[in-house]
Image (cartoon, rainbow, N blue to C red):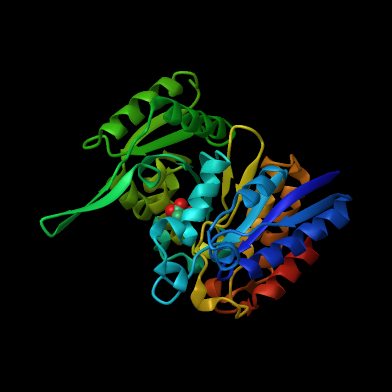
Amino acid sequence: MDYSIALIPGDGIGPEIVKEAKKVLDAVCRKYHHTFTYSEVLLGGASIDVHGVPLTEDAVARAKASDAVLMGSIGGDAKTSPWYQLEPSRRPEAGLLAIRKALNLFANLRPAYLYKELQKACPLKEEVIGDGFDMIIVRELTGGLYFGERKTTEENGVKTAVDTLTYNENEIRRIAVKAFDIAMKRSKKVTSVDKANVLDSSRLWRKVVEEVAADYPEVTLEHMLVDNCAMQLVHNPGQFDVILTENMFGDILSDEASMVTGSIGMLSSASLNDTKFGLYEPSHGSAPDIAGQDKANPIATILSAAMMLRYSLDLDKEADAVEAAVQKVLTEGYRTCDIMSEGCTEVGTSKMGDLIAEAV
Ligand code: IPM
Ligand code: MG
């Protein structure tokens, strides 16, 4: 089959990790006789350098015209990069938020899974790890604090900054439905995370999630306050299956969940709208400190490409092959430096991509 894929290399380590993911996709094409046509799209700092803005209408149009979007990472070093001299709405991150909104990507799925091979890289004690863990964070991605009205004012020499956290019931319902649908294909448990002891938006969240839960009698629903969830993730991560939460809580908890898997360099993510279309990117950032040094771990991006095959292109067998190839290379003991442990073979970004592509 023929598919068109928009590629967003982005900034920092983005271009090098996307290059490795493309290697793996090329191997998939050869083995399963598909043709992927790529169009490169500028976003973030890379777009600012060329167009002066982090996202253009043309970039959105090209993304929309594709079957799916595969992205590396965006952003630079806030202390040294000239991008951060610009006003906040013109910085790289604003481009990422804007493309998520423009493509209506309200559902962000971030799986956090502990590979047996990476147990040594996991910062938790063995008795906490137990039989390992396998959870998926379903984060609302186009509402809440990151998209509410914000402003900074000054009165009598005193500055005041305001951000607004708004959710309507439709926004809550559609993300809750996604989470329950996913739970039905997994262990049938949803933990909905909120701050209902303080926030109105969380109390509405809880009410709507309960209404949705009524349509899924087989799924166990539990509610958890976000501060408790942060603690439970390092106390007993095995208790979670699907974590459903709003935008900012999901941003924070997904970084925490990724770290307990051993490295943020391993975690993929999918951002979906209500069709099959999605944008796929690693959960980690652009790591400008190691950019261009062949040190970055490309596995999160490669696993994001696997999610793309599965969710947007309906290529399950091919997605399985990519995931199995990652597993094989880890079993054979190859590691990038972020997940290196004694007795393993350290390889760079490009070699890791080669090994996984060969294993496909
Ligand atoms: C993420 C990132 C982004 C977010 C930033 C770069 C705007 O942290 O994808 O988690 O907060 O969503
Ligand atoms: Mg984040």
In the rendering, at what x and y percent does residue 244 appear?
Answer: 43, 38
Image coords of residue 57 (percent x, y): 61, 48
Camera-side residue of 112 and 12: 12
Which residue is painted at 50% across and 22% down in the image?
A: 216
Q: Who is closer to the viewer here, 171 or 160? A: 160
Residue ranking furthest to the left: 156
Q: Is residue 133 visible?
A: no
Task: Give the residue at x 68% y 51%.
Answer: 306
**Residue 73 shown left or right of residue 201 in the figure:** right
Which is more toward the observer, 188 or 168? 168
- Compared to residue 284, the image places residue 348 above or below, namely below
Is 235 situated above or below 74? above
Image quadrant holding the N terminus, namely top right
Q: Give the position of the C terminus as an image quadrant.
A: bottom right
Identify the residue shown where x is 39% and y is 61%. 87
Q: Quadrant of residue 276?
A: top right
Total marks shown come to 0
Q: Is residue 218 left or right of residue 127?
A: right
Q: Position of residue 212 (x, y in %)?
A: 45, 23
Residue 340, visible in the rendered structure:
yes
